[in-house]
Image (tube, rainbow, N blue to C red):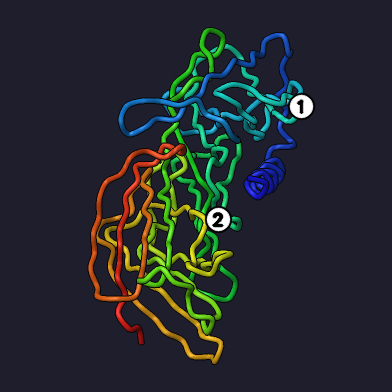
């Protein structure tokens, strides 16, 4: 979450440079900062109150054109930024509230929920540009490339909504929907014994992941890319796994690629196409063990993070 704050801060500074010379001041008495009530949708129709970081981007009514936000009485590209707890404002000293004249606006909401379970510690994302009058339907959130390689980092846990609001009579209220997929990989010995000490490192790659999310619609788009992340050995040495990584949805079925580097320098690899696409608001747990290849998938219950969770077991033969 700290990294998301950093990326948002950088984007705000960049966006501000293009609009500093505009004279868009107004009397603060004509500006209104609405109240807030945010929730996250579950697939089963239930909702839970949102807790986390939320950004609010006001657009013109019935439009994707960025209106801007009044800061200290001046219209600026600095969109609303909130820490939210249980669906409403939290820690007002950090928030940059929406402040607008009475009227109808088309609000875009992007947020990252507070994590209930451990998640991958090094996500990255390319932020969208924000400038007054910019068409946000032409902007996107994008994957961040790992330096000097053709692979990309996992992303943040992202939720999204767009809703019309009448400033002056309505609160900021929306049902946020998760627009990323989650993936957890567990590698173990088929007999549940300690994994070989000859293993130096294990890396995972997932192919066919969309490279962007449209900023206005939240829909995946762009050229499919490959995401990479490492697995870490458990304290008791019986398995190697990752904290849940977040991915943009896949463009069809992805190929799962596992690379094991041994301490003697030899590299072993395994590949298998997943049985179904990685869809938004779906969490997939892959468990791999050495043995005959088989694949089994079943639908599970929602986790605390409101995931539609699936599990897929892969038995891996001797890998080359």
In the rendered image of this protein, does residue 312 appear above or below residue 257?
A: above
Give SS at disc 2: loop
Residue located at (25% from left, 55% from top): 297
The label on residue 146 is none
Residue 100 picture location, percent across and down: 62, 18
Residue 156 picture location, percent across and down: 53, 49
Residue located at (56% from left, 24% from top): 86
Of discs 1 and 2, which sits in the foreground? 2
Give SS at disc 1: loop
Residue 51 picture location, percent across and down: 56, 31
The residue that disc 2 covers is 120
Residue located at (34% from left, 42% from top): 308
Give the crowd class for mark 1: few <14, some 14-19, many >=20 residues within 10 Å.
few
Residue 164 picture location, percent across and down: 44, 21
The residue that disc 1 covers is 93
Q: Nearer the viewer, residue 161 or 269?
A: 269
Q: Nearer the viewer, residue 26 or 4?
A: 4
């Amino acid at each position: 979450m700290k990294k998301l704050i950093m990326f948002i801060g950088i984007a705000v500074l960049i966006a501000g440079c293009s609009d500093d010379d505009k004279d868009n001041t107004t009397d603060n008495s004509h500006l209104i900062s609405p109240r807030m009530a945010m929730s996250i949708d579950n697939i089963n129709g239930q909702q839970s109150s949102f807790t986390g970081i939320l950004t609010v981007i006001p657009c013109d009514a019935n439009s994707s054109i960025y209106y801007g936000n009044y800061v200290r009485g001046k219209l600026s590209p600095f969109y609303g930024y909130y820490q939210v707890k249980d669906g409403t404002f939290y820690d007002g000293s950090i928030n940059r509230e929406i402040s607008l004249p009475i009227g109808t606006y088309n609000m875009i909401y992007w947020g990252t929920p507070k994590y209930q379970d451990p998640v991958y510690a090094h996500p990255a994302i390319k932020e969208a540009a924000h400038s007054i009058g910019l068409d946000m339907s032409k902007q996107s959130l994008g994957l961040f490339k790992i330096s000097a390689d053709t692979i990309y980092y996992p992303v943040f846990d992202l939720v999204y909504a767009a809703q019309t609001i009448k400033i002056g009579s309505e609160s900021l209220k929306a049902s946020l929907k998760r627009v990323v997929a989650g993936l957890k990989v567990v590698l173990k010995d088929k007999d549940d014994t300690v994994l070989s000490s000859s293993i130096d490192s294990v890396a995972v790659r997932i192919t066919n992941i969309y490279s962007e999310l449209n900023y206005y619609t939240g829909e995946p788009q762009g050229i499919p890319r490959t995401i990479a992340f490492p697995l870490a050995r458990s304290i008791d040495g019986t398995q190697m796994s990752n904290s849940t990584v977040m991915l943009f949805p896949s463009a069809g079925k992805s190929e799962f690629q596992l690379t094991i580097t041994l301490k003697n320098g030899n590299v072993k690899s395994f590949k298998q196409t997943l049985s179904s696409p990685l869809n938004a608001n779906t969490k997939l747990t892959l468990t791999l063990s050495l043995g005959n290849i088989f694949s089994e998938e079943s639908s599970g219950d929602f986790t605390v993070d409101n995931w539609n969770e699936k599990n897929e077991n892969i038995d891996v033969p001797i890998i080359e």
